[in-house]
Image: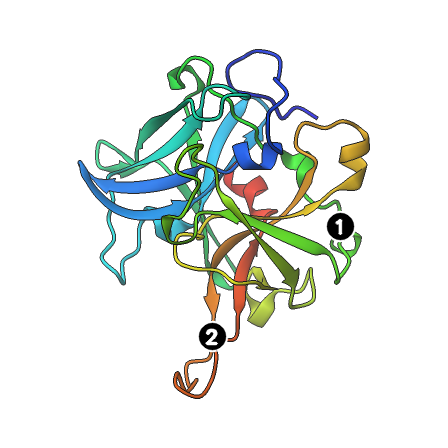
């Protein structure tokens, strides 16, 4: 397992589960004007480090959302979690988008990845990252009754002292491995809000825990948005409480 802090040193033992340090909050900006809050997570492919989030966090034409940069919060001390700093990344270079997004036979995929320049990271930044080894080897290895967690920042909510995300517990709500309605996502049953877009959908991986892996979770998907009925009576009927999670194996394509 090669998930390691990005400060080019030996991984310190964090004061919290490393999942909390693998999932930074995101704020999008148009210049210096803050636009939206979102969630994301780190993904490492060989020696390259990426920030993963929902594509609509980076651009969303229907809502006229066109940020020019984003910022994430990085922790600088694995024990004193109040030591944090903001790290900003531009979304365009010479007018060209620097993130990657994808499509498949079902249309656009609501996942975007932005490569992080390791040399630009602040000294001592603590970064735990998922890797291709954290993806399921096959869909059958994930039981339908698996207990899931979604680590993110609903409505921008967070621990304001330590800048940590919150966990929502979830369940798989459609057959895992089947593309729901022909799209590249499955459904989860969880209470979510705006700001959770881009959060990792994970399940505890006990094999990795036994091996002492620095990030003992299996990455199943990328939370995108709530799924609802267009004809729901908003007075009589509750929201379905279902969400779209794009299959995480799209990251192998986007980071190739």
Q: Position of residue 251 (x, y in %)?
A: 55, 42
Residue that extends furthest to the front in the rendered view of this protein:
161
Closer to the camera in the image, 252 or 128: 128
Could you tell whether 22 is left or right of 34 in the image? right
Q: How many marks?
A: 2
- Image quadrant containing the C terminus: top right
Q: How is the image coloured?
A: rainbow
Packing grade of label 1 (10 A; few <14, some 14-19, many >=20) is few
Q: Distance between the Cα atoms at labels 2 and 1?
A: 29 Å
Packing grade of label 2 (10 A; few <14, some 14-19, many >=20) is few
- Image quadrant containing the N terminus: top right
| Disc 1 secondary structure class | loop
User: In this picture, is 253 found above or below 174?
Assistant: above
Identify the residue under disc 1. 138
Identify the residue under disc 2. 228
Q: Is residue 99 visible?
A: yes
Q: Is residue 256 visible?
A: no
Closer to the camera in the image, 14 or 88: 14
User: In this picture, is 48 found above or below 28?
Assistant: above
Could you tell whether 136 is left or right of 82 in the image? right
Please name the residue shown 59% across and 68% down the image.
180
Could you tell whether 238 is left or right of 10 in the image? left
Q: Position of residue 102 (x, y in %)?
A: 46, 49
Q: Position of residue 8 (x, y in %)?
A: 54, 12
- Name the front one of labels 2 and 1: 2
Disc marking residue 245: none
Could you tell whether 68 is left or right of 134 in the image? left
User: In this picture, is 38 found above or below 70?
Assistant: below
Dot placed on the residue nearer the N-terminal end, 2 or 1:
1
Q: Position of residue 56 (x, y in %)?
A: 36, 53
């Amino acid at each position: 397992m090669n998930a390691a802090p990005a400060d080019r040193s030996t991984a310190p033992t964090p004061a919290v589960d490393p999942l909390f340090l693998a999932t930074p909050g995101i704020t999008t900006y148009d210049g210096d004007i803050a636009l939206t809050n979102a969630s994301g997570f780190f993904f490492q492919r060989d020696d390259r480090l990426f920030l993963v989030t929902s594509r609509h966090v980076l651009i969303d034409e229907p809502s006229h959302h066109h940020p020019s940069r984003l910022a994430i919060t990085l922790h600088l001390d694995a024990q004193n979690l109040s030591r944090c700093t903001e790290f900003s990344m531009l979304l365009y270079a010479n007018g060209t988008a620097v993130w990657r997004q994808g499509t498949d036979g079902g249309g656009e995929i609501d996942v975007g990845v932005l490569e992080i320049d390791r040399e630009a990271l602040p000294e001592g930044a603590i970064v735990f990252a998922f890797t291709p080894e954290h993806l399921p080897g096959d869909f059958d290895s994930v039981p339908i009754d698996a207990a899931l967690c979604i680590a993110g920042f609903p409505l921008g909510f967070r621990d304001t002292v330590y800048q940590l995300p919150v966990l929502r517990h979830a369940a798989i709500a459609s057959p895992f491995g089947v593309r729901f309605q022909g799209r590249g996502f499955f459904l989860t049953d969880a209470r979510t809000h705006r700001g959770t877009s881009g959060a990792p959908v994970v399940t505890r991986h006990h094999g990795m825990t036994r091996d002492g892996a620095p990030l003992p979770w299996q990455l199943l998907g990328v939370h995108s948005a709530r799924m609802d009925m267009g004809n729901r009576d908003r007075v009589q009927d509750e929201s379905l409480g279902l969400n779209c999670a794009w299959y995480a194996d799209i990251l192998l394509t986007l980071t190739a």
